[in-house]
Image (cartoon, rainbow, N blue to C red):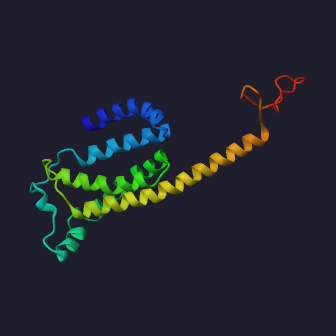
């Protein structure tokens, strides 16, 4: 709970300056930071499950063991579904925030890998190949959905700009005039 509260406060404080400095969408930066905090609080806090520490506990012995671990090492279908959903919104938000796919694909692949490697050292947590596969899969689905959302946002933005451009002229100061470009009814501003 502490991770969630502190991360939430830090996210709110950093979102606007970070977005302004990097040229990102401010709302996207805030959502991405808050979702990152949520992911960290869910995955990197101590749990109550017994486990074997060390990376070797999550490495399969052979190819058959690898296939078995991907399918059976998680907490069942419900846990796999939750792991699938865990990174989906974060990856989608990263696409919308950055306006590009590559950073979100990197998050979708590298973040779950880092989480699983970190979990081998956290008491009550363990590494699971099925969690890793579900997290990466959910992240990649989030990238696709984020790309669709970004396309819709860009289309909506272009349409709004076209409507604004056809219904308002801009005066010499750069101010948009909703009355057709006239400051006063009897004054025409060229621009």
Quadrant the N terminus occupies: top left
Left or right: residue 88 versus residue 59 is right
Give me the residue at 47% from left, 45% from top: 97
Give the quadrant of residue 37. Answer: top left
Give me the residue at 26% from left, 60% from top: 131
Give the quadrant of residue 32. Answer: top left
Residue 33: x and y in percent read 38, 40
Residue 128: x and y in percent read 20, 61
Quadrant the C terminus occupies: top right
Q: Is residue 97 visible?
A: yes
Give me the residue at 25% from left, 49% from top: 43
Name above or below for residue 145 compared with residue 38: below
Name above or below for residue 63 compared with residue 189: below
Give me the residue at 68% from left, 48% from top: 159
Name above or below for residue 118 compared with residue 171: below
Front residue of 119 and 79: 119
Q: Is residue 1 visible?
A: no
Left or right: residue 12 versus residue 112 is right
Give the quadrant of residue 46. Answer: top left
- Of all residues, the one furthest to the right in this rendering is 186
- Of all residues, the one furthest to the bottom in this rendering is 64
Residue 22: x and y in percent read 45, 37
Residue 141: x and y in percent read 42, 60
Front residue of 187 and 160: 187
């Amino acid at each position: 709970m502490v991770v969630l509260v502190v991360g939430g406060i830090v996210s709110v404080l950093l979102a606007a300056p970070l977005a302004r400095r990097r040229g990102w969408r401010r709302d996207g930066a805030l959502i991405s930071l808050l979702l990152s905090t949520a992911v960290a609080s869910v995955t990197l806090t101590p749990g109550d499950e017994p486990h074997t520490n060390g990376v070797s506990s999550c490495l399969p012995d052979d190819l058959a063991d690898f296939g078995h671990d991907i399918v059976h090492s998680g907490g069942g279908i419900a846990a796999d579904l939750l792991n699938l959903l865990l990174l989906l919104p974060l990856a989608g938000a990263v696409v919308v925030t950055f306006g590009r796919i590559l950073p979100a694909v990197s998050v979708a692949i590298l973040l779950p890998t880092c989480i699983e490697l970190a979990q081998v050292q956290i008491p009550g947590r363990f590494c699971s190949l099925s969690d890793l596969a579900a997290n990466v899969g959910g992240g990649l689905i989030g990238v696709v959905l984020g790309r669709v959302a970004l396309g819709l946002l860009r289309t909506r933005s272009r349409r709004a700009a076209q409507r604004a451009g056809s219904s308002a002229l801009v005066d010499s100061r750069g101010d948009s005039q909703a009355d057709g470009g006239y400051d006063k009814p009897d004054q025409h501003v060229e621009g």
